[in-house]
Image (cartoon, helix red, strand yellow):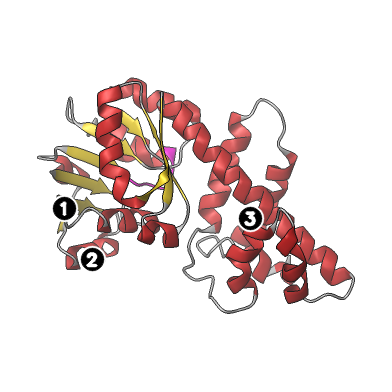
C-alpha cells in the first residue's frame, strides 16, 4: 500500500519504521532533516505535505497537537476524498469531533506508551471511528506497533481521544506523585534511591520504575522519550476537556511549566525529578 506519513518526530519515526518494509512509505516533516533516518531505511521524502499525499492510498499523521493538525491538514484541505486518514496525534475529544466532521474518512488512533514499547510493537492503541470497515482497515495498519491485548477499537474518534487523555492523566498525576514523594522522603533524610525502593510496593511503582534511570543519572533527559512540552500540552487538553477542576493535573502542569521556563521543555518529562532541587 502507498502510505503517506506526516510528522517524523520521536513517535512518528518509530511508527514509520514499522511500515517501511511491508509498504511503500512517503514521509514529510516540517524540519526535513528529522526525516533522514527514515529515508536511510527506504522511505521516500516529500518536499511538502501536499506532495506526500498526492498518490497515497492511506494517510497517517503524527503531529504535536490539534493546532498542528488544523494547520497541516484541515486548512489546506489536504485529505483526498475517500482516502483513510489515521491520526495518531494526541488531541482533545472536541478536536477529534471537529476533525471527524471535517473529513469523513478520519480515524483517530492515538498511541499509549513511549519509545521503547513503540520499537517493540507493544503500544496501546485506541482506534476510533463509527465506520466499522474503516476501523478494521486502520487496526490492520497500526497492528505492527500495537500490543495484541492493547489494540482497542472504539465507536468514535472522540472516544479514542478520551482514552488517550485518560492514559496520559495517569502519567501526569503519578509523575507529580513521585516528585512529591521524593520531596517528602528527602525531607526525612532518605536519598532518592531509598525513596524509589520504598515506592516499589505502592501505586507509584510504575512511574518510579520507568523514570528511575533518569533519577539515578543512568540516562540523560536529552532527548529522552516523552517531552515536558508534550505532556504539558496533553495535560492542558485534559483540563480544557473536564467539566470540573483537575487539581492533581493542574499541579503537574505547574511543575511542567517551571521546566519550560528553565528551557527544558524539549527534554524528557523526568526533568521534573532530575532538576527538582532547582524548582
- Name the residue furthest bottom: 218
Decide: few, some or many residues near mark 2? Use Cα within 10 Å; few <14, some 14-19, many ≥20: some
Which stretch appears magenta? 61-66
Q: Is residue 118 left or right of residue 230?
A: left
Q: Residue at x 66, y 63 (%)?
A: 208
Q: Position of residue 248 (x, y in %)?
A: 73, 44
Q: Position of residue 195 (x, y in %)?
A: 77, 69
Q: Are marks 3 and 2 in contact (CB under 8 Å)?
A: no
Q: Position of residue 168 (x, y in %)?
A: 56, 45
Front-lying residue, 198 or 63:
198
Residue denoted by label 1:
22
Q: Are marks 3 and 1 in contact (CB under 8 Å)?
A: no
Nearest to the eye among marks 1 and 2: give it.
1
Rounded to the nearest angstrom, the CA distance separating label 3 from label 1 is: 39 Å
Per the rendering, the mark at residue 36 is 2
Q: Is residue 230 above or below residue 242?
A: below
Q: Secondary structure at mark 2?
A: helix
Q: Is residue 240 left or right of residue 203?
A: left
Where on the picture, by quarter, is residue 209? bottom right
Q: Position of residue 37 (x, y in %)?
A: 25, 67
Q: Are marks 1 and 2 in contact (CB under 8 Å)?
A: no
Front-lying residue, 151 or 219:
151
Rounded to the nearest angstrom, the CA distance separating label 1 from label 2 is: 19 Å
Residue 105 visible within the image:
no
Q: Is residue 132 above or below residue 86?
A: above
Q: Earlier in the sequence, mark 3 or mark 1?
A: 1
Q: Residue at x 33, y 53 (%)?
A: 12
Decide: few, some or many residues near mark 3? Use Cα within 10 Å; few <14, some 14-19, many ≥20: many
Where on the picture, by quarter, is residue 75? top left
Decide: few, some or many residues near mark 1? Use Cα within 10 Å; few <14, some 14-19, many ≥20: few
Amino acid at each position: 500500500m502507498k502510505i503517506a506519513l506526516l510528522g517524523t518526530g520521536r513517535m512518528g519515526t518509530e511508527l514509520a519504521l514499522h511500515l517501511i518494509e511491508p509498504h511503500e512509505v512517503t514521509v514529510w516533516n516540517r524540519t526535513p532533516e528529522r526525516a533522514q533516518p527514515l529515508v536511510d531505511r527506504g522511505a521516500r521524502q516529500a518536499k511538502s505535505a501536499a506532495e506526500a499525499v498526492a498518490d497515497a492510498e492511506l494517510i497517517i499523521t503524527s503531529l504535536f497537537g490539534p493546532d498542528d493538525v488544523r494547520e497541516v491538514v484541515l486548512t489546506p484541505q489536504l485529505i483526498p476524498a475517500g482516502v483513510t486518514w489515521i491520526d495518531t496525534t494526541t488531541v482533545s475529544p472536541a478536536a477529534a469531533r471537529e476533525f471527524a466532521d471535517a473529513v469523513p474518512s478520519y480515524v483517530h488512533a492515538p498511541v499509549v506508551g513511549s519509545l521503547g514499547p513503540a520499537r517493540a510493537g507493544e503500544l496501546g492503541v485506541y482506534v476510533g471511528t463509527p465506520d466499522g470497515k474503516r476501523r478494521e482497515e486502520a487496526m490492520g495498519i497500526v497492528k505492527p506497533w500495537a500490543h495484541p491485548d492493547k489494540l482497542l477499537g472504539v465507536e468514535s474518534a472522540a472516544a479514542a481521544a478520551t482514552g488517550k487523555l485518560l492514559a496520559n492523566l495517569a502519567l501526569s498525576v503519578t509523575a507529580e506523585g513521585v516528585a512529591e514523594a521524593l520531596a517528602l522522603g528527602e525531607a526525612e533524610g532518605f536519598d532518592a534511591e531509598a525513596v524509589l525502593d520504598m515506592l516499589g510496593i505502592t501505586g507509584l511503582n510504575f512511574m518510579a520504575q520507568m523514570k528511575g534511570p533518569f533519577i539515578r543519572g543512568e540516562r540523560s533527559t536529552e532527548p529522552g522519550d516523552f517531552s515536558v512540552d508534550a505532556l504539558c500540552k496533553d495535560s492542558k487538553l485534559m483540563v480544557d476537556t473536564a467539566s470540573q477542576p483537575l487539581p492533581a493535573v493542574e499541579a503537574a502542569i505547574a511543575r511542567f511549566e517551571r521546566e519550560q521556563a528553565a528551557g527544558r521543555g524539549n527534554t524528557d518529562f523526568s526533568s521534573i525529578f532530575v532538576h527538582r532541587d532547582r524548582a
